[in-house]
Image (cartoon, grey):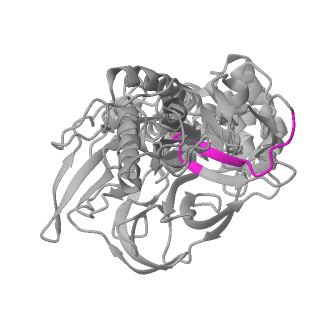
Amino acid sequence: MKIKTYILLSLLVVSGIALAQDVKLKGADLLFEMRAYKQAAKSYETQKRTKKVLQNLADSYYYTTDLDDAIKTYKELFDNYGDNIDNEYNFRFAQALKGIKNYDEADVYLSRYYNQPINTNAFIEKNEELTPHEFELKQFVNENSTSDFGLSFYNDSTVVFASARSSDNPAYSWNDLPYLNLYTATLNDSIVLKDIKPFSENINSSTHESNAVFTKDGKTMFFNRTNPQRKRTDNERIAHIKIYKAELVDGDWTNITPLPFTSDSYSTEHPALSKDEKTLYFASDMPGSMGSFDIYKVTINDDETYGEPVNLGPTINTIHREQFPFVSELNVLYFSSIGHQGYGGLDIFRSNILNDGFDEPENLGSSINSSLDDFSYVLRNSYDQGYISSNRTGTDRLFGFFRKINPTTRYQVEGVVKDKNTKQLLPNSLVTLFDEAGEVIDEVFVGDDAYYLFKIEPNKKYKVRGKIKDYIAEDVEFSTDSEGRVQHNLNLTLESFDDAEERIRENKKGYLQIQLDKIFFDFDKANIREDAAKILDVLVDLMKKYPSMEVEVSAHTDARGDDDFNLGLSMRRAASTLEYLVSQGIQRNRLKSVGYGETQPLNRCVDEGICSEKDYDINRRCEFTILY
């Protein structure tokens, strides 16, 4: 009887232990589902190390940047269950390894994940050669900082940023830090925040607020706010994030409303405004995203309504996270990504905004990106000074940066200017470098060696133009691609107008003139007759063929009659001819009209009564001389 009682008690103890373990495991799973990763990790550490426990424990370490424990646990997971693990664990294990700069081992798992060879060290070596800029970073001097990020400018000296510094806020279960609020500060040094105080109590709430952005007039702001209630999404219970808009009315932030495309079923976050403030960029995991978070844009209409959100597409977005967009004054999109090849964690990238989309994103390099998360890039007035956020020191911190040209980068275009037919050098030619929008970046008059050189940047489109008097301008378009073609040797070969066109000839004074049939005017008149218009149309066609050609239109009379009358008549006829050319689509700034009267005869008929009508007629003419 005693033996049976002992066995029964033992079974009850074992069952109780198993039940307790099961309750603890369910509690750990619930914490993980709610993204309470710090607490989940502590709970999982006491559980039997099954496949699921190892997966969730490793992820809990990973998501709280406890990389050493994450790597150790991922390794155990792969050692025990490597043949039966979801592919995403290859990616996260690789990112954890990249976080401690173990790139060789990380590449093993990235190669498995992408099913193709990945060589991070080769990427880094190549990127360091091609990155056009170097960044000098300094961490902010900031008292009472626990976790600060997402700095933006409210005006020239006042900034707004998110911080977990308030001990009055409850702890956030993800990382056991207080909930985020927005704060204002004066930035009177590049990395020193003064007079830090909470932002408007109308904006800060009992949940997270972050990533504020302001219109230039300071009267409208957009910001993140986390929903107070969690919603089940797949296997998680998530408090999604919405973008809110607020308006400054009589000194108070009011009319605080979520944007119409936000939802309780997905997140919209990290608002950024275009230069003209007509487009809002943001990150979202809304339906239709390529994976995790993508970057979107939406039109802000004149009536303050919004268009439909547009995904920026596969050039920018990957199946992993793209977040924290920022658009510069030069229409360049900066954003952070863990999906494009990088140094580890979120890296900062840039891409030029083009008419038909975006060019290939460019990693900004190791002087600004670390092996952990780098994000929330923003510029301050000067294009070479700005701010980022990074968790490279263990928690989110603000950093200032100064940018300068990378002296090791060899991005350049060079060449010489030659005559197309004679192959002779053309000293004193003007060579101009244009950007894709047609704006002049740089220009130079070449010397005796006819050589030019311009520094350029990667992932951009350019045009080089060579031009000199009496020659047809030559344009050459090119781009600096993402595969490292940084040096371009473009010799410009210009053809002279008289070589290209039979009707263009050099006169006795060495000037090139366009030979047209003679233009007749009615007696004492300056209007263009129908027969003259047909002749001038030949010149119109020629000038449209050569858009760089500039022409002087000159009119001449014979020596008969009053000198002043003849001068005035020639000026009116030259001006009338110019106006006709303009009416046919030739730009006025390409033309010049001059009336010479009887001052430039072509023969000896310089006085009345000494020549025949035929000889006087030679001097009554219009001439078209090429100026450039």
For the view shown, which residue lies furthest in the front direction?
609
Q: Is residue 453 left or right of residue 226?
A: right
Quadrant the C terminus occupies: top right
For the view shown, which residue lies furthest in the left direction?
250
Asked whether 319 or 327 is in front, the reply is 327
Q: Residue at x 73, y 18 (%)?
A: 115
Asked whether 160 or 556 is in front, the reply is 556
Query: Is there any visible trace of residue 396 in the rendered image?
Result: no
Q: Residue at x 75, y 35 (%)?
A: 75
Magenta residues, start to end: 423-440
Q: Is residue 576 magenta?
A: no
Q: Does residue 44 sit above or below 161 in this rendering?
A: above
Q: Is residue 128 left or right of residue 303?
A: right
Asked whether 258 or 239 is in front, the reply is 258
Q: Does residue 610 sit above or below 4 in this rendering?
A: below
Residue 504: image location, x then y, percent: 64, 29
Residue 57: image location, x then y, percent: 60, 39
Residue 386: image location, x then y, percent: 54, 64
Query: Is there any visible trace of residue 43 in the rendered image?
Result: yes
Q: Is residue 203 left or right of residue 47?
A: left
Q: Is residue 581 left or right of residue 370?
A: left
Q: Residue at x 36, y 31 (%)?
A: 521
Q: Quadrant of residue 547?
A: top right
Quadrant the N terminus occupies: top right
Q: Is residue 424 magenta?
A: yes
Q: Quadrant of residue 86?
A: top right
Residue 34: image location, x then y, percent: 41, 40
Q: Residue at x 57, y 49 (%)?
A: 440
Q: Quadrant of residue 306?
A: top left
Q: Does residue 121 sit above or below 287 in this rendering?
A: below
